[in-house]
Image (cartoon, helix red, strand yellow):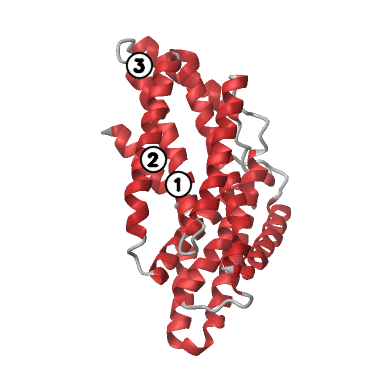
Amino acid sequence: MIALANMLRELAGLFVDDGALALAIIAVVAFAGMVVTSMPQASLAAGAVLLLGCLGVLFASAVVAGRPD
Amino acid sequence: MTGSLTLIWPAMTAAFLASLVEAVEALTIVLAVATVRGWRPAGLGSLAGLAVLALIVVVLGPLLGHVPLRLLQFVIGVLLLLFGMRWLRKAILRQAGVIPLHDEAMTFATETEELREQARRNEARLDWLAALTSFKAVLLEGLEVVFIVIALSAGHGMLLPASAGAVAACVLVAGVGFIVHRPLARVPENTLKFAVGVILSAFGVFWTGEGLGVAWPGGDLAIVGFALMFLAVSGAAVLLARGPRTEVLS
């Protein structure tokens, strides 16, 4: 039972390691979804939000983790 | 179809490199089990893990065909973003020296010592424990490979090239491991993870956008542009994250 629980935990860990990074990615995707819903004719704007948001989130997450306390 | 052809090489390369990393990690643990308890439990555990993986592919594969394409692309895209950016972040931090590099020799030594400790405590059940360790390693590392192959081929009929890349890597690692009987510590794991993280993140943005209805300029070729942008941003992050101290985060 403990082995099964450990395996499930490791399975979840495939996608979520740093909770803040995962939440930020979901927030970017949700925001891009809101943009495409409110402006269906300008889907590229949603694409830009998605791409730049993900790049920004990755950069911020890595730089903050490497910053001295 | 021409559009899909532009994706074959990135998909096959990503599947090959990712599978190489995962197969090396699984091999290290299987070798540790074989060293302490022999090849029988190590082999049986590995075979059981491979059988469960095959079952997952056989059951899950046809089911995915029934999911509407845009929903499938969106869900797979978001999972790829979570998975790929997690790999990429870790590779950036390792490259910057913020967290230590993954050390196969150390993993092998730790795993071997744990199994020897279990042997001292409970000799009778050790074959089961050894087989379970081997099974767990193959299953968990293999699940990552299965996910990457399925995700890269989502909706674009690239199951064959992605699977070919993954199988080639697993056969290569198993073959080399069988010959040298030692963990493959010289594989530049972090560089591979960096490259795979870049490609998976690029695919993740592309699929998620397609799932949302975004018409990417250049079609499938946009993935190459996304990968270059992720590479540039990751390189900049390595430079900025690189500090005077080395903090162990994991």
Q: Which mark is residue B220?
A: none
Question: What kind of element bears circle 1?
Answer: helix
Q: Are marks 2 and 1 in contact (CB under 8 Å)?
A: yes
Q: Position of residue B48 (x, y in %)?
A: 36, 30
> Is B52 situated left or right of B38 in this image?
left
C-alpha separation, residue under disc 2 versus residue under disc 1: 8 Å
Question: What kind of element bears circle 2?
Answer: helix
**Amino acid of disc 1:** Val
Quick one: label 2 or label 3, which is nearer the N terminus? 2
Above or below, comparing residue B200 to residue B168 in the picture: below
User: Could you tell me if residue B130 is visible in this image?
Assistant: yes
Q: In which quadrant will I find the N terminus of chain B?
A: bottom right
C-alpha separation, residue under disc 2 versus residue under disc 3: 22 Å
Question: What kind of element bears circle 3?
Answer: helix
Q: Which mark is residue B127?
A: 3
Q: Position of residue A9 (x, y in %)?
A: 37, 43
> Is B80 situated left or right of B231 in this image?
left
Quick one: label 2 or label 1, which is nearer the N terminus? 2
Q: Which residue is mark 2?
A: B53
Please tell me which residue is depicted at 42% across the width and 28% down the height of the picture: B46
Quick one: label 3 or label 1, which is nearer the N terminus? 3
Q: Which mark is residue B146?
A: 1
